Amino acid sequence: MITISTLALALLTAVQAVEAQSPGCGKAPPSSGTKSMTVNGRQRQYILQLPNNYDRNKQHRVVIGYHWRDGSMNDVASGGFYGLRQLAGDSTIFVAPNGLNNGWANSGGEDITFTDQIVALLKNDLCVNEGEFFATGWSYGGAMSHSAACSRPDVFKAVAVIAGAQLSGCSGGNSPVAYLGMHGAADNVLPISMGRQLRDKWLQTNGCTSKNAPEPSSGQQNHIKTEYSCTRAAVTWIANGGGHVPDPSGSNGVKFAPGETWSFFNAAVGGGGGNPNPNPQPQPTTAPAPQPTQPTNPGNPGGNCAPRWAQCGGQGWNGPTCCESGSTCRASNQYYSQCL
């Protein structure tokens, strides 16, 4: 026999589902690919990636992936949106915006305005769940994800920041947003102390109880996850022993960031948001050993070039100064250059 309370709960759930449904539900969708829009009089671009089996009548999750400094929307898309697309099935629409001058300075809030226009377009043209917008990024992209959480807590349910820092501003920042921070103890571009600053800001905003968060030593192949007790929104901190990379390796060489990010996003909405596998666990996959490549410049005669994401130069650097095919050695500062 169905009780009144059970019926009331079912009706409430149905009403909430309808309220989260966007105006784009039922409409013929735009195609995946590179799109353009005018923002404050300037042409901006982004990549839209729909699920392979997009259903115009089903609400979809949205993940916005911001690129790193000197990266681009193409890098994010070709990298599977930080490894999340393979975990999403047909549940998620992915977007990779392109920053001005290959970065996210967010001068005068122009990159937040860009994000606003993308969000409005997605809601109008596609069937999205307005309660399941997420953002993620590495380095400058992590900084922009943090900024989006500060400025648009009514839009983003959770963000995942990989090796980020306070670089893109934090307008507002007084409303709770679930926050996952991941950072390497050996990061010599944006030191882990800068990642802790972001974490501590969200610990305060989200009403979390302070606790000790152990971290691996620099260079140690290990990662330690700390989950805080919070009254307003979740905060999780994962420290690893590596450097400034978008796909950090932890214990036993596991590339943990995609699985931890996806699980965190799922937890933020209490389930899978239409994902047929709503709570995927991070799969322990050992990082493949870098394959030998032929040097492409005279800076490393007779040796191997550095793999993508690895260090390739900087003051005092004695390792390879060339990069494997498909990547280029780019300077972040006088102490650090990286294959990107």
Image (tube, helix red, strand yellow):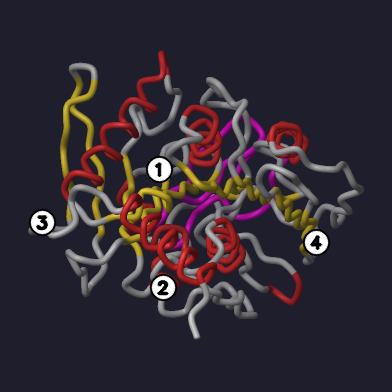
Among numbered discs 1 and 4, the one appearing first in the sequence = 1
At a point 43% along the width and 62% down the height, the residue shown is 13
* Image mark for residue 309: none
Foreground label between 3 and 4: 3
Label 2 Cα neighbours within 10 Å, binned few <14 / some 14-19 / many ≥20: some
Identify the secondary structure beneath mark 3.
Answer: loop
Badge 4 or badge 2: first in the primary sequence: 4
How far apart in space, not on screen, are marks 1 and 4 (Cα)? 28 Å
Badge 2 marks a residue whose secondary structure is loop
Residue placed at 25% from the left, 43% from the top?
A: 46
Q: Are marks 4 and 2 in contact (CB under 8 Å)?
A: no
Identify the residue position indicated by label 2 in the image.
275
| Residue 306 point in image, percent of width and height | 55, 59
**Mark in front: 4 vs 2:** 2
Q: Residue farthest to the top? A: 108
Relative to 254, residue 65 above or below: above
Whether residue 48 is visible to the viewer of this picture, yes or no, is: yes
| Principal secondary structure, stretch drawn in magenta | loop
Foreground pick, 67 / 122: 122
Q: Is residue 59 left or right of residue 175?
A: left
Q: Nearer the viewer, mark 1 or mark 4?
A: 4
Q: Nearer the viewer, residue 132 or 103?
A: 132
The amino acid type of the residue labelled 2 equals Asn
In the image, the segment drawn in magenta is: 313-340
Give the residue at mark 1.
71
Write down the residue under mark 4: 224
Cα distance between the residues tagged 3 and 4: 45 Å
| Labelled pair 1, 3 in contact (Cβ < 8 Å) | no
Residue 316 on the magenta segment: yes
Residue under the image location 10 percent in, 56 percent down:
27
Residue under pointer 3: 27
Residue 287 placement (x, y as % from top left): 61, 75
